[in-house]
Amino acid sequence: AAPPAPPSAPRPLGAARYSVCFDGQDDVMMLPLIEGICGVSLWLWKSDHAVLNSTVSTLFLLDALTPNGEVSTSSTGDAWRRLYQDGEELPSRSMSSLSTDRWVHVHIEASQAMDARMHLMANLAARGITFSGNLKGCLSEVYVWNQVLNGMQLRAITNGFNYRDPRLQ
């Protein structure tokens, strides 16, 4: 199946002009081993129909491939302490609390620094060798942080930022 067209909705100020779209079938983004992960930030467009064609019950926005390292449709593991949308902490760490059918800035804060390989837009089977029925949507500007970000930093990233800005150092 052809990948979905990028969403036509206007992008918020902080979102990039380009995105990678996932058709929900056999696409997954795999990141190599990264040391000292304290948080992950990304722009997400998740369709309200993102999980309808899934052949598996658990779909991952992010799976750190460590014990309790998932942010999925069924749970958010203890490896993650907080979940933010558009710079505001959500009362629930559940992926279902994220808005759909619009671009949202998502930040996930780790409970403690961890070393991990990560899969984005995957499913439970992606931990093995089968890639089918993954999360459908688009990602833009994925950042992995080696420090905990404060509220000012999160708002700056959500609203568009210059990575050379000393406030973000």
Image (tube, helix red, strand yellow):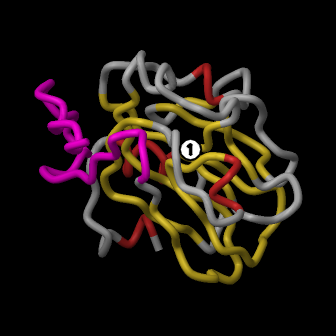
Circle 1 packing at 10 Å, graded few (<14), some (14-19), many (20+), is many
Asked which quadrant contains residue 158, the reply is: top left
Secondary structure under the numbered disc 1 in the rendered image: strand
148, 82: nearer the viewer: 82
Residue at 56%, 50% (x, y): give it: 122
Residue that mark 1 sits on: 61
**Tag count:** 1
Q: Quick check: 147 above or below 88? A: below
101, 13: nearer the viewer: 101
48 with respect to 63 (left or right) = left
119, 113: nearer the viewer: 119
Residue at 38%, 72% (x, y): give it: 166
Q: Quick check: 49 above or below 142? A: above
Residue 21 part of the magenta-drawn span? yes
Q: Quick check: 30 above or below 157? A: below
For the N terminus, give its image quadrant: top left
Horizontal and vertical percent position of residue 21: 28, 47
Horizontal and vertical percent position of residue 25: 42, 43
Q: Quick check: 30 above or below 23? A: below
Dot 1 amino acid type:
Leu
Residue at 33%, 58% (x, y): give it: 141
Q: Which residues are magenta?
A: 1-26
161 with respect to 112 (left or right) = left
98 with respect to 104 (left or right) = right
Asked which quadrant contains residue 43, the reply is: top left
Residue at 41%, 39% (x, y): give it: 24
Dominant secondary structure of the residues highlighted in magenta in the image:
loop
Residue 6 part of the magenta-drawn span? yes
Horizontal and vertical percent position of residue 162: 25, 64
